[in-house]
Amino acid sequence: MAEKILELEKEMARPDFWQDKEKAREILREYQELKEKSKTGGESGRYDKGNAVLTIYSGAGGDDAEDWTRMLFEMYQKFCQKRGWELKILHEHRNDFAGVKNISFEIKGKALPRGKAGVYGILKGENGVHRLVRVSPFSPKKLRHTSFAMVEVLPEFDKNIEKEIEIKPEDLKIDFFRSSGAGGQNVNKRETAVRITHLLSGLTATCQSERQQERNKEKALRILYGRLYQQKLNQMVEEKKEIRGEVKKSMAEWGRQIRSYVLHPYKLVKDHRTGVETSDVEGVLEGELDEFIKN
């Protein structure tokens, strides 16, 4: 793997690298994939064939950021529809203007032929900060506004994950509450929704999609295991950076901007990792993501 990365780096350093843009983008995609695998010792490809759980968090920007979170969710929803994937909301926290403070949803794909990536393998590159620049619909003066949202992509784990990540019952705080709708209104008279907090790490997971409390608890626990597993991988990355003498950067992600979506003063979607870009912003927001997502 190291030899291939070195080979691609030499190719990318050539003065005529960008003469064939399509070929250059393919090389950049391959380079990014290999770099990700090298960071985690190959662990990143372990769950590629499986399904995924995505969570989108609104960042800086108030109502605009929460509206941007809604737009991103709808973008992924349309992408899933085009592929025939099943999407189910696990938990959502909406504001009074149909915006979304945060939302978690699971995506299930169809059975795949040998060698093909599954939902997680296709979507894992969406993990990171997404930036929107537009004229704010919430600004009376029609000012330009920048909003941020963070996308978290986790593989769907089965019970085998419990062998790798140990969670003691006394390290968990479990809260039960009523499922809520838009604006935080309670839509269920019974406390079926579940929030689980891992006291040692502070990580939480919430699920309210099922009618039975036990099923919500089970799903929330799977998500929590996934977040702890991802934290473990991130620690491995940081340890390897320290061993190599690299500068240690924060993994708390708000600095990990991966893609910009500009609606004003011009139209452009640009991936900051690969250099892939398009002026068809509307198409991208309608779920046309194939140009940015490696199958």
Image: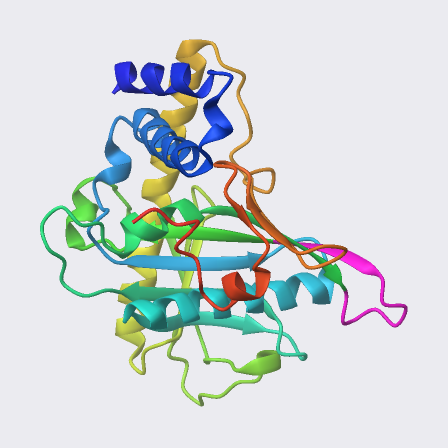
In the image, taking residue 140 as reference, residue 87 lies left or right, namely: left
Image quarter of residue 145? bottom right
Q: Residue at x 39, y 18 (%)?
A: 11
Q: Is residue 78 visible?
A: yes
Main SS of the magenta segment? loop
In the image, taking residue 257 as reference, residue 143 lies left or right, namely: right
Image quarter of residue 222? bottom left
* Residue 139 within the segment the image draws in magenta: yes
* Residue 143 within the segment the image draws in magenta: yes
Task: Give x and y (percent) for residue 150.
Answer: 54, 51
Frontmost residue, 168 versus 248:
248
Frontmost residue, 295 versus 277:
277
- Its colouring scheme is rainbow
Q: Which residues are magenta?
A: 136-148
Q: Please say if 1 is above or below 107.
A: above
Q: Residue at x 34, y 56 (%)?
A: 223
Residue most extreme to the left? 114
Image quarter of residue 237? top left
Q: Residue at x 45, y 59 (%)?
A: 55
Q: Is residue 175 visible?
A: no
In the image, taking residue 234 as reference, residue 60 lies left or right, namely: right
Task: Give x and y (percent) for residue 190.
Answer: 40, 86
Q: Please say if 159 is above or below 274.
A: below
Task: Give x and y (percent) for residue 214.
Answer: 27, 73
Q: Residue at x 30, y 30 (%)?
A: 37
| Number of numbered markers | 0
